[in-house]
Each structure stands twice: as C-alpha cells, then as structure tokens.
Amino acid sequence: MEAFSTQGNGTVTVVKEKSPTTFDVEQNLKTMNGARTVTLDRKTGHLFTMSPEREPAPPTPPLANAGRRADRYPGHLRF
C-alpha cells in the first residue's frame, strides 16, 4: 500500500504503509514546479502530474532616477 502526496513545490512524496499504524517515506520524486494535481494509471502504475508551463518573469525595468530620492512635492525646489 502506497500513498502519493504532491506539494506543488516540485516534489511528490511516496509514503509506504508498513503496518496499519506505521508509515515510512519511501522516496521524494522531482516534478514540475507547481504540479499539484496527480493521477495514477492503474494499468501501467505510472503517476501523472499536471502544471501549466510558465515563462520566466520579465526583467524589472531600470528606474529612471535610480539612487536619487523621489521628490515629495513635485515642482518643489530643494536647496
């Protein structure tokens, strides 16, 4: 008897029942990050997980006045 748990962080944990009150982690499998839905094909014994493929986040554009303090009052002169 085995149980499978997806965490959504890129792993599936396989837990094996040793007795009705004893369980051991058999292994942790690497999956696609975000995969939380899991199903078992009983004919082949294969597990399938699903997750949308995501593109990397776009780079943050550089700030026009990086390093300068923003004006608290636009148009106000600082001395």
Image (cartoon, rainbow, N blue to C red):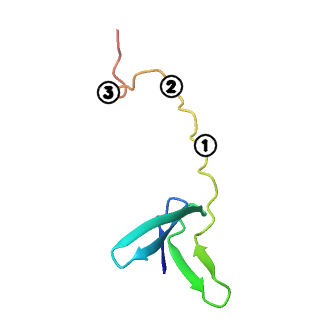
Please report the residue visible at 59 percent of the width from the left and 51 percent of the height from the top. Answer: 57
Check the image and name the residue furthest to the top. Answer: 79
Check the image and name the residue furthest to the front. Answer: 19
Q: Name the front one of labels 2 and 3.
A: 2
| Mark 1 → mark 2, Cα distance in angstroms | 16 Å
Which image quadrant is residue 68 in? top left
Q: Name the front one of labels 1 and 3.
A: 1
Callouts 1 and 3 close, C-beta under 8 Å: no
User: Which residue lies under the disc numbered 1?
Assistant: 59
Question: Regarding mark 3 in the picture, which secondary structure is present there?
Answer: loop
User: Which residue lies under the disc numbered 2?
Assistant: 66
Callouts 2 and 3 close, C-beta under 8 Å: no
Residue 46 horizontal/vertical position (percent): 64, 80
Q: Amino acid at mark 3?
A: Arg
Left or right, 52 with respect to 15, comes to right
- Disc 2 crowd rating (10 Å Cα; few below 14, some 14-19, many 20+) is few
Q: Amino acid at mark 1?
A: Pro
Q: Amino acid at mark 2?
A: Ala
Residue 35 horizontal/vertical position (percent): 54, 68
Question: Regarding mark 1 in the picture, which secondary structure is present there?
Answer: loop
Please report the residue visible at 61 percent of the width from the left and 89 percent of the height from the top. Answer: 42
**Foreground residue among 12 and 70:** 12
Work out whether mark 1 precedes mark 3 in sequence or the reverse, and give the earlier one. 1
| Mark 2 → mark 3, Cα distance in angstroms | 16 Å
Please report the residue visible at 32 percent of the width from the left and 27 percent of the height from the top. Answer: 72
Please report the residue visible at 35 percent of the width from the left and 14 percent of the height from the top. Answer: 78
The label on residue 72 is 3
Residue 70 horizontal/vertical position (percent): 39, 26
Work out whether mark 1 precedes mark 2 in sequence or the reverse, and give the earlier one. 1
**Foreground residue among 38 and 65:** 38
